[in-house]
Amino acid sequence: MSGVQHHLPADLLLSFASGTGDVGGDLLVATHLTLCPRCRDEVAHLEALGGALLDEIDGEAIARDPHRAPVEHSRLTFDGPVKRRDANDEHVGEAAEIQDDGVLPRALLSLVGPVADITWTSGAFGQVHYLELPIEHAHAPLRLVRFKQGMRIPTHSHAAQEIVVYLTGAATDLDHGIKYQRGDVSTYGPGQSHQLAVEQGEDCITLIANMRLVGKTLMSRLVFRLLGWC
Ligand SMILES: [Zn+2]
């Protein structure tokens, strides 16, 4: 049974299901879908609904103009390079060659390789490690970020909507009493402030879009600036 409690924003699911999302957004969705049966069902439902609507539109268009080319359906088939491979294991394609590392969903694994082989960039005096990915969501690069177990991320807000998918470990939003763990998604809009405590036990690896933090104090602003987080 999935323990996922916190899900993707509906607009990201819609973009994925309709084939209108950007590559980074699709990677966020594919990563979460791998770990969340509820959102997989939701996307399957949207896919079926979209297919039926397109069929209807096709039918009406052809009835009006028999020479008109049918509407292209391929955007609803989820065959893109990073889409839903783990959500539907029989369609893993070339990613079937990649050895499952038990941590990264296949869409991520095919992009960065096994987590044990990642060359992390170290920051925050060894408290945080990250890997910038060569893809973007909403014009900001995605990053894999590994937070050291037990660390605190001081009170901050965000310059733009931040979306985080948790892959290992856990972290608690101390201001709202929300715990995030494997498969969960946190979404914070611009200006929404909070502080996080990473739990003991194991490092917390996350996939993050738009990690542009705004520190509340001069010191945290300085730290975030030094880390390239703003
Ligand atoms: Zn979900």
Image (cartoon, helix red, strand yellow):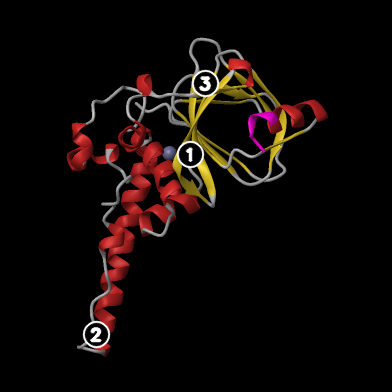
- Which comes sooner in the sequence, label 1 or label 3? 1
Point 79% across, 26% down: residue: 219
Image quadrant containing the C terminus: top right
What amino acid is at disc 2?
Arg
Q: What's the distance in space between the residues labelled 2 and 3, CA to CA?
A: 54 Å
Residue contact at pointers 1 and 3, CB within 8 angstroms? no
What amino acid is at disc 3?
Ala
Ligand number 1: quarter of image: top left
Point 33% across, 32% down: residue: 109
Q: Mark 2 points at which residue?
A: 68
Depth order, front residue of 91/115: 115
Q: Mark 1 points at which residue?
A: 7
Which-is-in-front pick, marks 1 and 2? 2
Badge 1 marks a residue whose secondary structure is: loop
Residue contact at pointers 2 and 3, CB within 8 angstroms? no
Q: Position of residue 141 (x, y in %)?
A: 51, 43
What amino acid is at disc 1?
His
Q: How crowded is mark 1: few (under 14 residues within 10 Å), some or many (20 or more)?
A: some
The magenta span reads 226-230
Q: Where is residue 185 in the image (x, y as percent from the top left)?
A: 50, 35
Q: Position of residue 34 (x, y in %)?
A: 34, 36
Q: Name the residue under label 3.
A: 170
